[in-house]
Image (cartoon, helix red, strand yellow):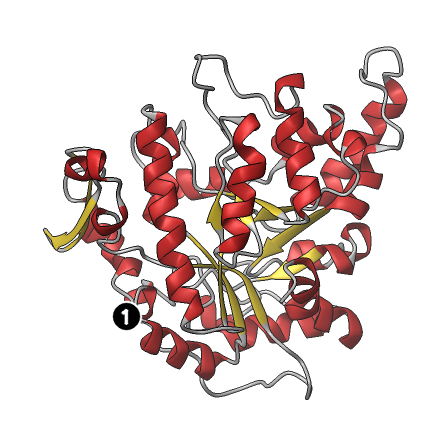
Amino acid sequence: MATAGTVLEIPEIVGIGDARYRVAQGEGWRPPAGTIVVSADSHWLEGDIWIDRFPAHLKDRAPRMRFQNGGYELEVDGKLSTLEGQAERICAFECVPGFNNVEARLKDLDAEGVAKEILFPQRTLGMNRLEDLEYRMACFRAYNQHMSDVCAGQPGRLHGVAVLNWWDPDATRDALQEIKALGFKTALIPISPGKHADGEPVMYNSERMEPFWAAIEESGLPICYHIGENSKAGGRGLAGIFVMEQMGGMRNIWSTLVFGGVFDRNPGLCVVFVESGLHWVPGALQDADLIYQSFPTHVEPRLGHSPSYYWFNNCYATFMVDPAGLALIDRIGAGRAMWSSDYPHNESTLGYTRSAIEAVFKSTSEADARKIVGGNAIEVFGL
């Protein structure tokens, strides 16, 4: 039932405000005994992590993170990556103590009943667009090493997401071995992948990328796509427009993998679509199957199965609060959905996590709810 004046169904969300001022929801609803709650999407603020891990010949160009101008300012290759005044605004969630302090984070997780987290990058996400590929790789390798160290201090509790080199498919196998040696159970690639070293656009459904996908399938690691990349929005209302655009679903990248035959050629692939919710999925499946049946002479390569088959065999999606998606869980598949807190972003459930998990249990059977709030993540990420 929606709260008066809004379609939001969890009263605690109304007036919740910036994450930095919230208090973890330590009281209230408890899940059934034996339930293991996993956030399949949380974030970690990197701090000044790069310079000590950068190769000697690039060290003078290493990114530097400093707290100044009311927030965290990241300098990448001598240039600030934040616009004037942005650091202070982003401090609305980047200044949550648990964002880069393990003790404070665990205190919030314990209060809200979250047993494990999958940790995605924060500022490192913005380095996808760096044009110097050697420099970009140095940034990602340093990040991976840092997150390996962070998670090693909390084994079984915190699990980082590595960033995988996607622009050099011939190097994928070695990159995955390095990632697995650091203890990672999953890796991240961008929705908009840019260009190869020779300037040719990276297209995930191209023949050139087949060694990339073959190496990933062989590794057994699930691959993640996460929202938060470039926006076409501008002008007044930018923040709201940007978040609406980002949360609009992953139809395009999912369609690329399906209709491009990536899943057909690599049936063991596991792909997780992160933070775009669940409600985009039923419409995408319906439209894709209709296209497949209605355009038999246009859809090439001809697939071995209807598009929806690949969703139910290869794909997953995460969400924080999605009553519209949960109402259609039979069309999505309870085994394909993973709850997350998105700690500690403003759109996160920090401050109402127990209520958000309760909403999952109210929406479906206890057995399916247990899968959604933790069981699926434990299986997919090998926790």
Residue 292, image x, y percentages = 85, 24
Q: Is residue 74 left or right of residue 183?
A: left
Q: Looking at the image, can residue 185 be seen?
A: yes
Q: Is residue 242 left or right of residue 353?
A: left
On the question of residue 225 being in view, the answer is no
Residue closest to the eye, 159 or 80? 159
Task: Spot the residue most to the left.
Answer: 69
Residue 89, position as x, y percentages in the image: 22, 51
> Residue sitting at 22 percent across and 53 percent down?
48
Quarter of the C terminus within the rendering: bottom right
Q: Nearer the viewer, residue 121 or 62?
A: 62
Q: Residues within 10 Å of mark 1 (few under 14, many from 20)?
A: some
- Could you say which quadrant of the image residue 354 lies in? bottom right
Against 84, residue 18 (above or below) is below
Horizontally, is 24 left or right of 117 in the view? left
- How many numbered marks are there? 1
Residue at the spot x=76%, y=35% of the render? 266
Q: Is residue 314 left or right of residue 126?
A: right
Q: Is residue 240 above or below residue 341?
A: above
Q: Quadrant of residue 197?
A: top left
The residue singled out by tag 1 in the image is 97
Of residue 370 and residue 185, the one placed in the foreground of this image is 185
Image height of 99 relative to 131, above or below: below
Tell me where residue 94 appears, x and y as whole percent: 28, 58
Q: Residue at x 37, y 29 (%)?
A: 129
- For the N terminus, the quadrant is bottom right
Q: Amino acid at mark 1?
A: Pro
SS at badge 1: helix
Q: Is residue 172 above or below residue 11?
A: above
Measured as percent of width and height from the top left, residue 150 is found at 38, 65
